[in-house]
């Protein structure tokens, strides 16, 4: 039983960055935009978060820097794919290549350095539940944040007016525009959210999963 618990807990840890990226991409695609540049945004978030946390001594500053880096990259993608109507596949792949190269360049001087990353925080009582407690309620803060975001995105898409408007823009942008919705603004916000989530996933990789910097 202990082995099973450890495997499940490790699975949750390893799946956290994937969950964050997937949630961001879900919002993007619901708006009618396919963002294939998530990997580049995640890597930029990873290096920005690590460098900011290392220089400031604050993990919170590192997370904020990572989210901002991912969001900034996503706005560049949105400008190309939404404003300029460039091919979304090409723009996304270009951002991935750009982010991969730039993150390696910016992090070159920090290779091998490590920091004190996020540690596990057990939730009282809930962490004592057999198996489930160790798997879900004895994790680091970013895992908890990812679960909150998961629930929030589910509620937003299905039970809020904003989620309805987002889906309307993605399914029929011309009809949405005819009804007064600002399609461009909605898509920019959706892409920015996706970039922020990719940046947060990057922060998880460099500040919690393996709190040190390597080129790959």
Image: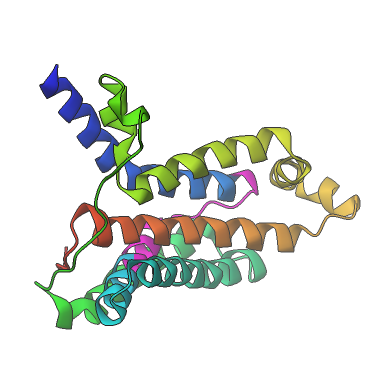
Residue 172 coordinates in the image, percent (x, y): 76, 43
Q: Quadrant of residue 85?
A: bottom right
Q: Which residues are magenta?
A: 30-45
Residue 88 coordinates in the image, percent (x, y): 53, 58
In the displayed structure, would residue 9 be above or below residue 188?
A: above
* Residue located 45% across and 61% down the image: 92
Check residue 35 for magenta coloring.
Answer: yes
Whether residue 87 is visible, yes or no, is: yes
Whether residue 37 is visible, yes or no, is: no
Residue 158 coordinates in the image, percent (x, y): 68, 33
Q: Nearer the viewer, residue 105 or 59?
A: 59
Q: Residue furthest front?
A: 124
* 214 to the left or right of 88: left
Check residue 119 for magenta coloring.
Answer: no
Quarter that holds the N terminus: top left
In the displayed structure, would residue 104 be above or below residue 167?
A: below
Q: Residue furthest right?
A: 179
* 37 to the left or right of 170: left
Q: Nearer the viewer, residue 196 or 86?
A: 196
* Residue located 84% across and 46% down the image: 175
* Residue located 31% across and 23% down the image: 132
* Residue located 50% across and 48% down the image: 25
* 31 to the left or right of 63: right
């Amino acid at each position: 039983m202990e082995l099973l618990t450890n495997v499940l807990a490790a699975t949750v840890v390893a799946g956290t960055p994937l969950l964050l990226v997937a949630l961001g991409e879900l919002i993007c695609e619901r708006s009618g935009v396919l963002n294939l540049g998530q990997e580049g945004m995640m890597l930029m978030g990873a290096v920005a978060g690590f460098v900011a946390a290392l220089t400031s001594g604050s993990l919170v500053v590192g997370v904020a820097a990572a989210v901002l880096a991912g969001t900034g990259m996503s706005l560049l993608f949105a400008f190309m794919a939404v404003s300029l109507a460039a091919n979304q596949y090409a723009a996304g792949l270009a951002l991935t290549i750009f982010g991969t190269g730039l993150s390696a360049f910016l992090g070159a001087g920090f290779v091998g350095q490590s920091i004190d990353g996020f540690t596990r925080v057990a939730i009282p009582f809930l962490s004592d539940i057999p198996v489930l407690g160790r798997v879900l309620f004895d994790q680091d803060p970013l895992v908890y944040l990812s679960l909150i975001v998961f629930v929030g995105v589910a509620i937003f898409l299905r039970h809020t007016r904003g989620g309805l408007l987002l889906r309307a823009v993605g399914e029929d942008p011309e009809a949405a525009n005819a009804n007064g919705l600002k399609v461009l603004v909605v898509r920019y916000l959706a892409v920015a959210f996706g970039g922020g989530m990719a940046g947060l996933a990057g922060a998880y990789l460099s500040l919690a999963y393996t709190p040190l910097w390597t080129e790959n």
